Amino acid sequence: MQNVAYVVGGGLTMSTAFRSDFPGGLSLAELCVESIQSLRVAEKTGLHERSKRLINSLLILLEKRGSFNLEELIEHLMTSGNPELEELSRQLSNEFSNCLGKRVAKLIDHLDENDTPTQDSAEMILALHQEDSSDEHIVGFITTNYDTLLERALKKRNLEPDFGFDHGQADANNLPLLKLHGSIDWRSGVPVKRLEAAYVNDAEPPLWIGPRRVKQARDYPFNGIWAKARELLARADVIRVIGASLYASDWHICQLLFLTARLDSLGEKKIELINRTRGCDRLVEAYPLLPLVPVYEDDEVIRYFCSLPKEAKIEEEHREQIRGRFGGSSNPVDLWLQAKVFSLSSVENDDLLSILG
């Protein structure tokens, strides 16, 4: 039995939106546009003329480029030394929180209206681990996501999230859910106050490490959460990174992975990357000292593609073609989940297939 820890980024949320045919967008680019457009209403924001001109310039840039790095923008504004621009960065961060909260609330309503396990990628992962035939034991989730989809999935599978700051009694139904950057439903308090709804547009901002390139975790509760994340990764035989780009703004997560690998004296841990081919290749090239395994080199994924019906099958001697499957338009998390279901179905688990589709 292998212990598995999941490091989850926005790609898992996008996968759920994709699988459930959610009509609203949840990409960072869409949220970025919506956040800036809402700031354009001067009567609402009370911003200075310089900030208004900057917002108009950003919208023109978005029309030309389609997107830009919101975290880097907020970082530059916050560290500009100009009080007007610093205030703009806070306004933009708050608008991003509001826009994200509204979209997530709509997605959760959409999932509840069309309630099947197969549409929620996080719930599918948990269902796979709860099967008796699984040879993997999930030890918990570490996530950079601000949304509450993982909490919903845990409750759907009769599990309770342990956020790392609820100092209650240990329970077999508790599973660590360590939100490194906080959550849209957290509010300041000791212990942290959690809202009942996925999104509430109140005056108090969320307790989070907002979208910035440099993320610090010196204060409660984040210092404790990040320490527990180190402990969680140390317990894992397999660290599965899903939908996390590990770009410069995620360097703190890379540090956790490097530290975990360095303390693995036997060299037995592996870090599986569930991402598109280009993203996997970039990380393998950037971090040669980490024991990274791209999804297209995973044994279960290879067996799955080599066992498909004739028209879709990839022959063993042409297994490099699997790289192309994960580089195309298909959702990489969806392809990986199909391979995991196939792996369990090989032990004739018909109930699992009926649940997961």
Image (spheres, helix red, strand yellow):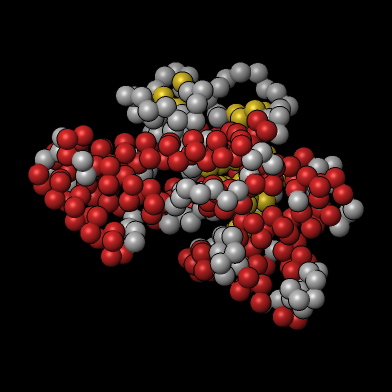
User: Of residues 212 and 234, which is closer to you in this image?
Assistant: 212
Q: Which residue occupies the foreground of this view, 11 or 262?
A: 11
Residue that extends furthest to the bottom in the rendered view of this protein: 317
> Can residue 181 be seen by looking at this rendering?
no
Residue 108: x and y in percent read 55, 37
**Position in image of residue 80 (x %, y %):** 17, 47
Q: Residue at (11%, 47%) from the top-left corner?
A: 50
Q: Residue at x 65, y 18 (%)?
A: 169
Q: Is residue 85 left or right of residue 93?
A: left
- In the picture, residue 173 is in which quadrant? top right
Q: Is any part of residue 314 visible from this angle?
A: yes
Tally of numbered discs: 0
> What percent of the width, then of the height, locates residue 135?
80, 48
Q: Tell me the residue at 49%/67% (across/down).
A: 282
Q: Nearer the viewer, residue 160 or 232?
A: 160
Q: Quadrant of residue 208?
A: top left
Residue 280 position in % (x across, y down): 55, 65
